[in-house]
Amino acid sequence: METIKLNINLSVNQLIEAVKQLSPKDRLKINDAIWNDSMEIPVEHQKIVLDRITKAKANPERLLDWDDVAKNL
């Protein structure tokens, strides 16, 4: 198992630049480590999403097409 010990102060941009220097394989390892963490979605947020899905299914005509919206941005 590879280990790296770092104790340096980096800005987010500096960290991003350092990660860009890694091989694609190592970048994927970092990505997996970040996103495979068990992220808990608060119940309140889950409820908001479920409410929006219910509204969209009940009234699909209220939804906007992304391509049309993007043209007006």
Image (cartoon, rainbow, N blue to C red):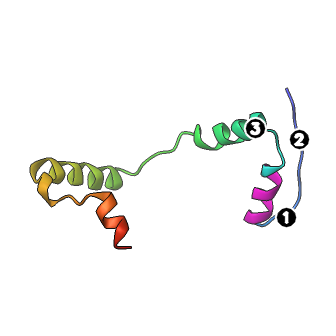
Q: Secondary structure at mark 2?
A: loop
Q: Which residue is mark 3?
A: 24
Residue 55 locus on image (x, y percent): 15, 54
Q: Earlier in the sequence, mark 2 or mark 1?
A: 2
The kind of residue on which mark 3 rests is Pro
Q: Earlier in the sequence, mark 3 or mark 2?
A: 2
Residue 59 locus on image (x, y percent): 10, 54
The kind of residue on which mark 2 rests is Ile
Q: Earlier in the sequence, mark 3 or mark 1?
A: 1
Left or right: residue 29 compared with residue 53: right
Q: CA distance from mark 3 to mark 2?
A: 18 Å
Residue 9's disc is 1
Residue 14 locus on image (x, y percent): 80, 63
User: Which residues make up the magenta segment?
Assistant: 12-19
Q: Secondary structure at mark 1?
A: loop
Q: Which residue is mark 2?
A: 4
Residue extending furthest toward the top: 1
In the image, residue 73 above or below residue 56: below
> In front here: 2 or 13?
13
- Please report contact status of discs 3 and 1: CB closer than 8 Å, yes or no: no
Mark nearest the camera among 3 and 1 is 3
Residue 58's disc is none
Q: CA distance from mark 2 to mark 1?
A: 15 Å
